[in-house]
Structure formats: structure tokens, C-alpha cells
Amino acid sequence: MTMNWSDHYFQLDNIYCVPSVHGSLDFAQILRTAFFEINPDCIAVELPEAFMSPVLQGVRRLPYLSVLAFPDRHHRNHSTYHYIPIQPCDSIIEAVRLADENGTELYFVDKDVQGIPIPKVMPPDTYYLTKLGLKTYCEQYLQGMQSSNRGSIHYQRELEMAFRVRKMAKVYKKVLFVYGLYHHNRITDFLQHPVEPTPDEIIDRDEIRLMHIDESTYQEVLGTMPFQTYLYEIGRKGLSSFHMGIELPPEETHKQIEENVKDAYLEKVRGKAERLKSIKTLDSKVDQYDNLHEIVIQSRRLYNREWDDQAPAGKLSIALSSPEITPSSMII
């Protein structure tokens, strides 16, 4: 099989691969661009087949956020749960969403296993994807990284995914395959030199639950900041094979949104400072509340100065109209 790289994917014969960092807006956009360039007959993603129904249900709820939760059966009383966030800024979720919206055949090709160990990997900032391109970013990510150990859970998953995708490639003209970048070396090796996988373990997944996320936990679940996720959702409505940029509201609208956010925050801080100043201690010569009041006021001034120094949202790379634009998941 001949390997060819483009800006948004690499190709092995009729298999088009998008190795990704999970929970990344930049990789979600790369995937979306690749989809419209390739126009695949089917999409394969790194998720077990047993998860397809609840994941599709969660994807159809977007932009409302969900998590797919399932118990760790290795843990006593099954009291520990793993979860997969269903969030817009993730390449696998975006792939599922595109398949569902465009009537493209969709396959979940990962091996269903229990107790997946999470590799301790700190990927380079995915913003560099827009500067370096996919090939160079992948090389930097994988530099010095050891592939999964033979016989390990990750090894078995990689072998299974590659085997199933190769079978799909015999049926479909163009297969788009989306998986975690950590698995890249093994998967490309297995795609070129196939090995028969071991039979799947039958795992009872009756306890899979799709759950709504309370807004107080968004920060813990989202891989991308909420405001950027909001911009991405706006952008999706205007994206097509002809225009892959991010469409934003008019500049004056954005400016007003920013000013409203700033004013609301500063008013809240001012109110806290005034309340602190009105409270007096009875048993201390040093009025600690006056000191706290001064700290809050100084923080407000610093925030105000930093806000005024920031670049306008319209100039951020996420907001550029350009073809180059671009839990945390427990499944890697």
C-alpha cells in the first residue's frame, strides 16, 4: 500500500486516514475539511460497535452536550464510571455527525474491551496544526514515543481496527478512517501488513447511559473552551465544500457581546468589593476586610487592563475565513 500525505489526511490506497488528538477543535476542523475533499463512501471511527446507538443519540442532541457513561466492571461494585463526552470539537464526534447528516455509511470499528489504560501523553498544542500541517504535527507528536506493547489492550484494539478497515476497503471505494493519534504507528503498520485479530470478548453493555451535562461541569468535560465551541457551532452552519471558513456574526455584534461579558464581570466584582468593605470585624485591630477589598479592586483593574490589551476576537485564528483553519475522552 502506498502512503501519501495531504494537508488534511494521509492516504493508503483507498483508505483516507485522519489521526487526531481527541477533544481538539483544530482536528475537528481538519476532519471536516477532509470529509468534503474526499466525499467518502463510508466512515470508520475509533469507538466500539456497542456504543453506536447511544453515541448517535447524543450527536443528534448537539449542540446540547452529553456524556456516554458506562461502569468499570473491574472495580468493586461497579461504582467507578468511564465516560465519553459528546462534544462538537472532537474529530470522532464530528465524523459521526457528518455521516449522520449526509447519509454516509458509518462503522464503529474499535474492539470492545474493559479497563482501558490511559497513556500518559502530552500532545503539542494543536494550534500548531494550522502552522505545521498534519504530517509535521504527527511526526512531532510521535517523536520518541513508544508504540503499544505487543499483546496489550491498545495493541489488540489497533489490530482489530486496522483489520476491520481493510475489510471495508474491499467493499467501498473511499473509506475515511478517524482514530487517536497515539495509535498511528501501529495502525499504519497493521493496515499495510494485516494480522488476524483475536475473537472479541462478549461484554454486557446494558448499563451504558447517555447523560445530560449540568452547565457547572462544562469546564471539566469540554476539550475546548466554551466560547470557541460556540464559534465552531456557528461556523458549522455555513461550512460547505466551497467555503471552509468560520462564519461569525457581524463585527459589531461580536464587539457588543464582548463588552457585555466584560461589563457583567466587572459589575459582579465591584459588587463583591463593596460588600467586603461594608463588613467590619469586631475583634481585630487590622481590618482584614479592607485588605481583601483592596485585593479585589486591584484584581479588577488588572482584568480591565488585560481585557483592553487583548486581540479582537475577529483576529483570532479560529475566526479567520481560511481553508487552513482548523472526556477529553476516556477512549483514546
Image (cartoon, grey):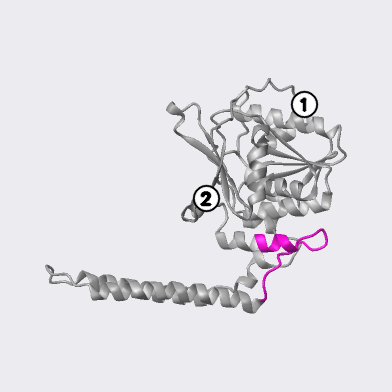
Going from N to C along the chain, the mark reached first, 1 or 2, is: 1
The image shows residue 38 at horizontal and vertical percentages of: 83, 49
* Percent coordinates x, y for residue 279 in the rendering: 22, 72
Q: Main secondary structure of the magenta part?
A: loop
Above or below, 289 relative to 142: below
Tell me the distance, in whole angstroms, between the alpha carbons under discs 1 and 2: 40 Å
Q: Is residue 116 above or below residue 90?
A: above
What's drawn in magenta, residue-wise?
Answer: 233-250
- Rendered image: mark on residue 79: none
- Judge whether 222 appears above or below 159 on screen: below
- The amino acid on which the numbered mark 2 sits, given as a three-letter code, is Ile
Q: Quick one: 260 or 185, which is closer to the camera? A: 260
Magenta stretch contains residue 238: yes
Dot 1 surroundings within 10 Å: few (below 14), some, or many (20 or more)?
some
Taking 220 as reference, is 63 left or right?
A: right
Tell me residue 144's x, y (percent).
61, 40
Residue drawn at 57 percent across, 35 percent down: 208
| Residue 102 in view of the camera | yes
Q: Which residue is mark 1?
A: 194
* Residue at horizontal 64 percent and vertical 71 percent from the top: 315
What residue is pinned by disc 2? Answer: 213
In this picture, is 234 found above or below 300? above
